[in-house]
Image (tube, helix red, strand yellow):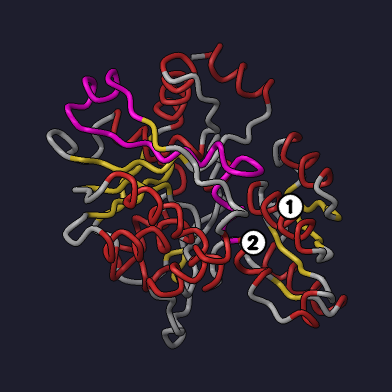
Amino acid sequence: MTTMPQPATPDLPAFADVERAAARLKGIAIRTPVMTSRTADAMTGASLFFKCENLQRMGAFKFRGAYNAIASLPEATRQRGVIAFSSGNHAQGMALAGQLLGVPVTILMPKDAPVAKIEATRGYGAEVILFDRYSQDREALGRQVAAERGASLIPPFDHPDVIAGQGTAALELIEETGPLDLLLVCLGGGGLISGCALAAHALSPGVKVIGVEPEAGNDGQQSLRAGRIIKIEVPKTIADGAQTPALGQITFPLIQRDVADIVTVSDAELVAAMRFFAERMKLVVEPTGCLAAAAAFAAKTPVKGLRVGVIISGGNTDLASFCRLLAAA
């Protein structure tokens, strides 16, 4: 565990940026359904509202931030291309957004990313460069490739337009459900929860926003409690979308200001949530996408008697791995 240098606080996105992102995404991103389950409510004693971003274009919320970020670039800058690094969902979001906007996209992906995510990224027309997440610094590699090609680097979470785009998921959720008592959001680098917190506090005053991390990768929890960014080794967890070693310089101050707490769940609890979604709600949800729900199901934070929004962040999982995890459980 190391403490990262704390630079001056950058300019932070605001709810107005989320509203502008929603206007850009209108008619482009899917307004994903909000689902409920009487069984889930009975299990938890809460009224749970599941925002199903596993049914978003390319299968995850990441499309929102990727499209908003690329669409916000000046036309001349777009044509020089964009670079991103991602374990899979930001990769696919960037690839699809680039395809829709006619922008060349290059993605740096860890070589152990799910095969389905690598193939889908290439299928959307992006160039994929594989790297070793345990021995190579993806951010340094991304900056190097961007400099060599004169392209714009759009990171997966620490970018104001990415954060604003991700916040549209909570905006839509609360527009549909009305005020919430609690909003549970998965946490990797913090882009989704930062944007969702902006929307939640603007539209549902008094709501508590709780982040959920895998037990093996609780850098966000450590950082929130320490008051500074804590960097850890790349965590080993089935939640591949949350295998980030540290929060970002933009996401951390937003989380400090707007997030009430961060809790963790085990890989076994993620698999239990995957099974619940498959058997009871007929939904395919990837492990990372189950983080928020697993926290509710396992009572990692009090939910009884509350109206609770739950962001299901994605459904991009290799079918063989999905079946193997459920069979092993």
Towards the viewer: 13 or 145: 13
Q: Amino acid at mark 1?
A: Leu
Residue at the spot of label 2: 67
Most distant residue in the left direction? 305
Residue at the image point whose x is 80% and y is 82% from the top: 76
Q: Is residue 50 left or right of residue 164?
A: left
- Above or below, 240 against 138 in this view is above
Question: Which label was assigned to residue 33?
Answer: none
User: Residue 230 in magenta?
Assistant: no
Towards the viewer: 302 or 46: 46
Disc nearer the start of the sequence (2/1) = 2
Query: Which residue range is magenta in the image?
Result: 36-65
Q: Give how far across and how far down residue 175 sits, in percent.
A: 33, 52
Specify whether residue 134 is in view. Answer: no
Residue at the image point whose x is 40% and y is 69% from the top: 252
Most distant residue in the bottom direction? 8
- Above or below, 50 against 245 in this view is above
For mark 2, give the secondary structure: helix
Circle 1: is it few (<14), some (14-19), or many (20+) Cα within 10 Å? many
